[in-house]
Amino acid sequence: MSEHRRKPPQPQGGGRAAARRGQSGSSSGRRAAPRGATGSPSGSYGPEDEERPYGSRAEARRAAQRSGGGRRRAAEPGRGGRRADPAGPVVVGRGRAAPSGKKRMIDYPRRDKDGWQRWVPSWKLVSGTCIAFFGTMVAAAGIAYAMVGVPVVDETATAQNNVYYWADGSQMVATGGERNRQSVNLSQIPLEMRNAIISQENKTFYSDSGIDPKGIARAVFNMAKGGETQGGSTITQQYVKNAMLNDQSQTISRKVKEIFVSIKVGAEVPKDEILEGYLNSAYYGRGAYGIQAAARAYFNVDAVDLNAGQCAFLSAMLKGATYYDPAGATSIDPVGATPKANRQRAQTQMQDTLDKMVEYGHLSQQERAKFTELPTVQNPRSNSQLGGQVGYLVDLAKASVIKSGKVTQKELDSGGYSIQTTFDKKKVEELEKAVKKVYKQNIDAKKRPKTDTHVQFGGASVNPETGAIEAIYGGEDATKHFTNNADVTGAQVGSTFKPYVLAAAMKWGVRDPELGETQAQDERTVVSPKSLYSGKNNLKINNYDGSVWENEKGEQWRQENDGKKSVGEAPDYKIDLREAMRESVNSAFVQLGMDVGLDKVKEAAVDAGLLEDSLAGSGYPSFSLGVSDPSAIRMAGAYATFAESGEQREPFSVTKVSNEDGTVYTHKVETKQAFTAKVADNVTDVLKTVVEDGTGSNAQLSGREVAGKTGTTDGNQSAWFVGYTPQLSTAISMFRYPDDETIKNRSFLEMYGTGGEKKIHGASFPSVIWQDYMEDALKGTKAEKFPKPEPIGEVINDTPPPSPTPSPSQTEEEEETSPSPSPTPSETETSPSPTPSNTCGVFEFNCEDGDNSGNENAGNENGGSEGSPSPSTSPSGTGEEDDSRGNQNGGGGFFAGQNG
């Protein structure tokens, strides 16, 4: 083996590298000679260069690595090659860095390791870092704990009023922000109330530290990802949150602060004091903060007198009164917060609380058995400032602000907001006066207790140009009748729905009966108002392709007209759609709806401005007759779309909200083209006929053009008039519905004989109220005309009918259904009719016998017009239609319509 391959002993003064240098002269040598040994000019550096700052080249290289950032290879070829660096020490070969004279505080990257190992932290570094981190956190927590104080609810539970303004800028009322709150000692809070809260919300209250780590983690996670925020899950945390009223922001920093405050409160404040503070600061709805205010708001008793059932009920209100108050909150959520839905939720929550009280030993089973029903609650409005219509206006405005998403309900309850509304004081007063006038002159509950009790009216006016709600009539008095009748009531709209059927026929057209279902959807014919349809009473309804409509049981549908009268000339009774609208002929519009497609009729109604949630199912022919129950506000807004030549704008009640920091919310009017001007103007032109010479003639205004439609529903349970001028659209409803919540299974009542009338029509009291109000509301404004409509569509079914000699049976039918004179009840009941055959299905109970009464199987508990009384005469002598009465109503019936 050659000498240079051996491993000689390492000298003390420089290691292997120095030994190799000492042997370089005698070896066969693959390493370059030291500079200067060859006599080369490039290798001469003089004697100074021989002095090295390090004991060896290895040390020089390691020093260079530490200062220059890494290991470098020699420039010259060969394993031992080296590179001269005039600016620093020589870098040679490989090797690990030798320890330097100075030690680093944090040895990272590690100096005694090579390659990737240099970046693996040592266990000392890891443990030291963890200790330092947690030590810092503990120190920070200690500082935070020391800095936060225990909040005092009484010092923070203050609020300002919210000020509501009329459209002209004058003040309507200052209310809604004052805190209805009175603190009571724990001794005045029933033990049942304390146990109800603990059983339902925090059963470990007396043993926990005041916080729930899992709940906190969940809340922080939700806030971090931008989801819904969550409050503290323990009573202590809720108490702290209620006390921190000056900072109700839902942020991570606030949540952290709340945690430290909760820990301090849990450690320093007695549990009974925390429970007392929580029950005295919690929000129970109806503006009530604290158990004493809640007891008065719901039951008009002091807190100390609450029983176990009432305590369990109030504990349910803490989950959110919007969805648990039996009075409902339809102005905020018309579908999910109805009185019926809220009562069910409150009942379920109350019973669950009572069961838990028994389970945890806080209540005996015998005592629990006493409370199986919701306790009776009082009217939610007790503030005298909210009497008359003001309470309804404030509720509507509050709901609008909350739905804007700019202000929460709790923030609004804290007060300090100025709310500019769209309500016109003069119009509100005129509408209330018109309703009271009719009520005073015609409704007498003492004289006619069976027919004139529980009579209610509702109304709303919308500006077509902007969508602003300018007036409403919500009921007799907001402090006595708390359901806003201008909003969702469940009253069906009847024939006031027919304009949407006509609009659908003009927008999309009828389907080609020669084509299949899929192709027919694309091949349509737009309908002209001159199109002809049958006005025959008891008409057998067909599908668009001419086949007879049948339900899943094979039962057919025969549609009646009011008074069992056919309209038009025998034998086919064809009339044009203008005439059908003028006389509100049910059979013609039911068949038109089938030809267009009920899905398109529904789409037209939604396009006009009705909420889809308020519409009944469209699986039955009766859908076209108004078995749905939109609100008066929405009906006025949808008709305003026709008034504005097809431009639809959402109804709104608030223009601006501001507080001490400036403007919080400003409403922006958004317009969409629901129908072309040609379609909308033609609908208006047809509806003008209704007022000029039809069922709506009572609504005529002096010197003004009016378009509108009457509506009366099956069983005479509601009546409507909806009409408009170019400047204002107004809807008026009338129905009977008990206010008394102690009555179980409340339902709409018939109005036969109400107000001394044989039958209530849209042409009677509703149209009279509409006319009286609109005459005064528009006084002083310029009379405007509607746009002249352009011709539209094709005339459908215009084939001249054959004129055969009537057969005896035809003559008998003509005599039975002759439109003039109107039959009296006795004449109707005794009119000749053959014995029903066995081929008449349940949906055909009038198919041969001519009887106008319904049956239980028809799906309507009122079953049509009992005894088939003749249409009563309106104050001006105009008859009206019973709009939605068919031989069944199935999925589109009255009660299905309420929930649809």
Image: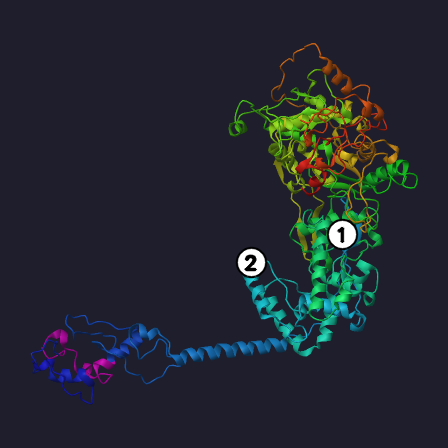
**Residue beneath the point at 22% across and 74% down:** 85
Is residue 659 visible in the rendered image? The answer is: no
| Quadrant showing the N terminus | bottom left
Residue 384 visible? The answer is: yes
The reply to whether dot 1 and dot 2 touch (C-beta < 8 Å) is no
Q: As drawn, which residue projects farthest toward the bottom?
A: 12
Nearer the observer, 524 or 99: 524
Most extreme residue toward the front is 838
Residue 56 falls within the magenta-colored stretch:
yes
Q: Where is residue 386 in the image (x, y as percent from the top left)?
A: 82, 51
Left or right of residue 266: residue 171: right
What x and y, as percent, mark residue 519? 51, 28
Labels 1, 2: front one: 1
- In the rendered structure, find residue 226 and report the number of the disc placed on it: 2
Q: Position of residue 498 (x, y in %)?
A: 69, 30
Task: Residue 175: say if magenta.
Answer: no
Residue 548's label in the rendered image is none
Q: What stretch is highlighted in magenta?
A: 34-59
Main SS type for the magenta part? loop
Say which residue label 1 marks.
327
Q: Which label's residue is closer to the chain start, 1 or 2?
A: 2
- Residue 338's place in the image compared with 450, above or below, is below
For badge 1, the amino acid type reads Ala
Quadrant of residue 232 in the image?
bottom right
